[in-house]
Image (cartoon, coloured by chain):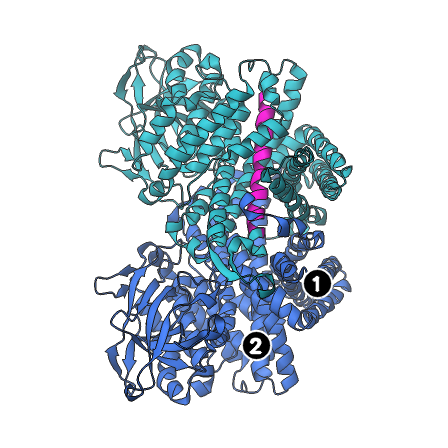
Chain colours: A blue, B cyan
Amino acid sequence: MTPFAAPVRDARFVLEELLEHDSLSLPGFEETTPELVEAVLEEAARLAGEVWAPLNASGDSQGCRRREDGGVGVPDGFAEAYRAYAEGGWNGIGVAEALGGQGLPEVVASAVQEMLHGANMALGLCPMLTAGAIEALAHHGSAAQRARYLAPLVEGRWTGTMNLTEPQAGSDLSRVRTRAVPCPEEEGDHYRLTGQKIYITWGEHDCAENILHLVLARTPDAPEGNRGLSLFLVPKFLVNDDGSLGERNDVTCTSLEHKLGIHGSPTCTLSFGEQGGAIGYLIGEPGRGLNHMFTMMNEARHKVGLQGIGVAERACQQALAHALERTQGRRPPARGGRECIIAEHLDVKRMLLSMRARTDALRALALTCAARMDVARHAEDAEARQAAQARVDVLIPVVKAFSTDQAVDIASLGLQVHGGMGYVEETGAAQLLRDARIAPIYEGTNGIQALDLAGRKLTRDGGAALDGLIDEVEATARALSISEDLHYLGESLAAGAADLRLAASLVLEQSHDPELGPDAVQAHATPLLTLTGHVLCAWQMGRAALKAEAALADGSADPFYRAKLASADFALRHWLPVGRAQLAGIEAGMTRLADLDPASL
Amino acid sequence: MTPFAAPVRDARFVLEELLEHDSLSLPGFEETTPELVEAVLEEAARLAGEVWAPLNASGDSQGCRRREDGGVGVPDGFAEAYRAYAEGGWNGIGVAEALGGQGLPEVVASAVQEMLHGANMALGLCPMLTAGAIEALAHHGSAAQRARYLAPLVEGRWTGTMNLTEPQAGSDLSRVRTRAVPCPEEEGDHYRLTGQKIYITWGEHDCAENILHLVLARTPDAPEGNRGLSLFLVPKFLVNDDGSLGERNDVTCTSLEHKLGIHGSPTCTLSFGEQGGAIGYLIGEPGRGLNHMFTMMNEARHKVGLQGIGVAERACQQALAHALERTQGRRPPARGGRECIIAEHLDVKRMLLSMRARTDALRALALTCAARMDVARHAEDAEARQAAQARVDVLIPVVKAFSTDQAVDIASLGLQVHGGMGYVEETGAAQLLRDARIAPIYEGTNGIQALDLAGRKLTRDGGAALDGLIDEVEATARALSISEDLHYLGESLAAGAADLRLAASLVLEQSHDPELGPDAVQAHATPLLTLTGHVLCAWQMGRAALKAEAALADGSADPFYRAKLASADFALRHWLPVGRAQLAGIEAGMTRLADLDPASL
């Protein structure tokens, strides 16, 4: 198994050179120096590489098991690795200091999260869900709730879960049936929950002292549909006034899923109220549960994108290590006739370059999105905050869906580089594909992301935020066009930007058609998201090429910059055209699709 | 688990309408009537759907196990299902009557094989390997060898294996080290083999009375490299002069691989000569082993393409069944507000259409290739045979690589249609992805296929055979262009054909450059193969659209034809552009790639 070296060099390139540490100039980050960021990345890389990564394969083969007593055992070493993470203070790095965190910029926290997911995605899911619970409580919890529950979550002593899905309610949460009944007044202000939730990530385990379940449920008087849903906090162990743990609550893990991948992450069916009703506390306003959940989910979607990138990075490293070691074939006699490592075969080198170029592009885009989150939260100027948030809103479904679709493909290509050895589980390449495959599904399927982009995000502002992003892409294209060596890249990028602008305007136009409207958006949503992902990734690689060219012109001999130029060339001239092809489909329209009886397929 | 219904309707469409049963007019097929073919397809569908398909999931979860005595147990029911196949005479349907088979056209045998692979790919591998052994013996075996070994193979009483790979010799077979030493003359004309072979599919099992291993090995006086390799027949049980089974030979299964998929197919490490030397018989000429193997491999590559198509078909059926049953969301109130099945959501319907369109296109292409094989073997006119063979030679790497790459993607999309349920193993969608993932690797990785196309097949005739295929594509484009309803498809297809012609000429041109030659071919091989696959698949769907339009114009109300038109529209106007984007990369060239130090990636 190839060891994992977290991508500190490339993360630093993005943070320092592409983003020029913009986040650090925002109010609240006065004490966050570039040196501190560097130290954080180096330390995170150590935790990822030395503590988390070595458990990735064993965690996969061992998996989780449900014990007789309803408890869940996670793979050997996971509890210790999680504690090393929590005790190292990693759980709070991105959490505001006011909430007990270290208040580092989101862009730094994101770089760290990617490293940890690359090291061990199954384990990384545990704190990822906790982060969602922290968000929900911080934004929607009462002062008393925040006082009681936040600190142990931020410290990582307790973990959190998100309980949305039920067997009949997946993408459509209006079907949620779990019920929450208020207790008689004399008993307190809590509710009693009964129902069943499925696919609850890290829903039960012994790695932490307590688990706080955030549960979407329906109150007795609530209307049908989305507006009837409220959000509840259901602790595994009830919490006494002094913060100590009290009784075990009425929530039990009734089974674990047998999944394709992320075997080290227990995916639980949770039953609430088998003994009469699980005690739950209303979070935020009644009937606003779905909105409150979406606060968490938007963040979580960005983090799922980071998962994809982490796994893609690991796939790159593992495929490269194999290709640098495995010898097959010889050079032609005219070229010395010596044995070749397979990385020298251009078809294989092309696969490696394709993996690397795409992974770097996705990382740059996801971190650019995170840097905008920092602006949206911390900029002094309200207009700047709003403008940044509008860009973030457009970027998040793209980061989630495009990164994870690509991650599956990158992991699959990594397996291919291994040849027959890739198909044998011991090599570890197959695990990366199996693990990556969940990411396009959870936190809203990639189809839902596409509808979010093409429906909500695009139509609500008439495409203004996306247009603003395309303006930035075009500015990069112009900068490339005046470079002697990179003008080809500029032409490519400009063409991509023009395609995206046209595609978005076509979808918008059709969305206003009273007859076609929702159908047009649905039919074109995924092609539009794919095209957007390609153009924005190409944009990032265009920016990277400019920086690399400047560094080389300044006399740098770092092979990193040469590789970056090769990656940029691949991304803009070989990969971007594939994305641009989505425009043809949008232009062709979808008459046949709307009229088609699916049963005839 | 969704039951599997073998695609009789579409196979008949391809055979009867697209190929107009051309094969049946060839010499030797006088007694093969369309009615017979129809009956064969119906019977095969029954075997596939009722006997093989129900064992697919249980075979996956149970897997194979190596017993203490070195034997290998395959999943419950596999032996019986294999016997049902053999006793039904299915093993010999495509084998010449002179060899004891039924001598049906390859195009019919191929349609049947696809059905069986769709039903149970792991089990389908067993006869697939036997077919290779039959080929090798029929072409290269002596009269005595054919007399002794062929009949039980054709009847399916014995099975065959191909032993090529060794730990150090995967894609590069010149590294094979297994040794074959001739016995002292007084002992006989056999050899003693010692060495180890890995990844031997169905290398050991109890489903048949005997196993014939075809083994690539090196004789003592042989030169290094490919020319030193000879082909040997090593029976598991030696065969007496009367055909009865004799002693157990010195070949043992020392381990089974733990693979990502095809768990029901035992992948063995075979050790030859642990007791002093396995008895083997030279097949064909000494030093020509690799050539003899390639006879088998070319055929086998076509069959691997069929595996991909079979699994893709099953993925289509399973995703559709789920999407027709699963309800999520509602129609907008203005449209009745009723509950929706997810197949009605256009984004999901688009996924289903994409899967169906690609699967149908791949099937049509693979069967078109098989029909050309029939001409290449049976046409009276030698020139016609040669011309057909030249087309077959170009088509085979495309059918193998493009079908299997697409199959992985189609299976992955099928999983996506299932949402969270797709990631849970019980649903069966994940198995299809795991099973499909081997097909781009074995029988020559898809990179090797691309090199075969762009290097050998394209350069050896200056692109003449590919040009001939493109002429046919253009003829279809012209036919579409004069149709009022389909002229858009004609424009698309013509553009694709032009792109492919340009791409092929660019690669050819660069291949003649003494400096760039091999590098250019290597760097552009995969993009060229991908583009070829797209254009040829679009061609098939263009032909299908013409037939469907004619049928509808004749008053047919069969929804099959409406679906075919929708698939063709998708294939030519949404999918083909993605393939055409490969030209941009070929035009951009690969300077950065050749100069790049892979270690810097």
| Labels 1 & 2 near each other (Cβ < 8 A) | no
The answer to whether residue B56 is left or right of residue A31 is left
Q: Which residue range is magenta in the image?
A: B350-374
SS majority, magenta: helix
Q: Residue at x 55, y 40 (%)?
A: B359
Residue A332 seen from this side:
no
Q: CA distance from mark 1 to mark 2?
A: 34 Å
Pointer 2 indicates a residue of which chain? A
Residue A478 covered by magenta stretch: no
Q: Residue at x 64, y 59 (%)?
A: A528
Q: Position of residue A518 (x, y in %)?
A: 63, 62
Residue sitting nearer the eye, B251 or A219: A219
Give the residue pinned by disc 2.
A373
Give the residue pinned by disc 1.
A513
Residue sitting nearer the eye, B242 or B350: B350
Q: Residue at x 51, y 62 (%)?
A: B329
Q: Residue at x 58, y 24 (%)?
A: B373
Residue sitting nearer the eye, B461 or A59: A59
Q: Position of residue A148 (x, y in %)?
A: 35, 86
Residue A56 seen from this side:
yes
| Residue B23: quarter of image | top right
Of the residues tagged 1 and 2, which is closer to the observer?
1
Residue A424: give its label. Answer: none
Q: Helix or strand or loop: what does disc 2 sit on?
A: helix
Q: Earlier in the sequence, mark 1 or mark 2?
A: 2
Q: Helix or strand or loop: what does disc 1 sit on?
A: loop
